[in-house]
Amino acid sequence: MLVAGDAHLKVSDADVARLTLVCVVQAEQQRAKDAGDSSEAEVWRHKLHHYLDQLFQKDQTAGADYHVLQVCPHCDQHMHT
């Protein structure tokens, strides 16, 4: 988890790894969308959801950093119909 210090922000290696993974998966999802491949974009969205779900189950504090991205794919589909 990112913790604000007195004059600087302390970031652990685990924070960097999580953020990097999330950014890469989001970039791949966007690349697929831009290419018009909605089925591949959906695969990347499911991968991100699965990763974040597993992260939250392992470490709720770390998972909480990404709670905005943890929309259930099934719920998300119904919101857009």
Image (cartoon, rainbow, N blue to C red):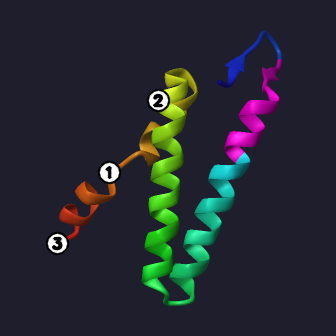
Query: Looking at the rendered structure, which numbered label has been put on residue 72?
Result: 1
Identify which residue, 33 or 46, lies in the foreground. Answer: 46
Kindly tell me whether residue 66 is visible in this rendering.
no
Mark pair 1, 2: CA separation: 15 Å
x and y percent of residue 81 in the render?
17, 72
* Residue in the picture at 68% in, 51% down: 21
Earlier along the polypeptide chain: callout 3 or callout 1?
Answer: 1
Query: Looking at the rendered structure, which numbered label has been put on residue 57?
Result: 2
Query: Looking at the rendered structure, which numbered label has been put on residue 81?
Result: 3
Helix, strand or loop at disc 1? loop
For residue 72, above or below residue 54:
below
x and y percent of residue 11 in the render?
78, 27
Q: Is the C-beta separation of discs 1 and 2 under 8 Å?
A: no
**Amino acid on which the number 2 mark rests in the picture:** Gln
* Residue in the picture at 23% in, 55% down: 75
Q: Residues within 10 Å of mark 1 (few under 14, many from 20)?
A: few
**Amino acid on which the number 3 mark rests in the picture:** Thr
Quadrant where the N terminus sits is: top right
Query: Looking at the rendered structure, which numbered label has been put on residue 25?
Result: none
For residue 66, above or below residue 33:
above
**Amino acid on which the number 1 mark rests in the picture:** Cys
Helix, strand or loop at disc 2? helix
Residue at the extreme bottom? 36
Q: Which residues are magenta?
A: 8-19
Left or right: 34 with respect to 74?
right
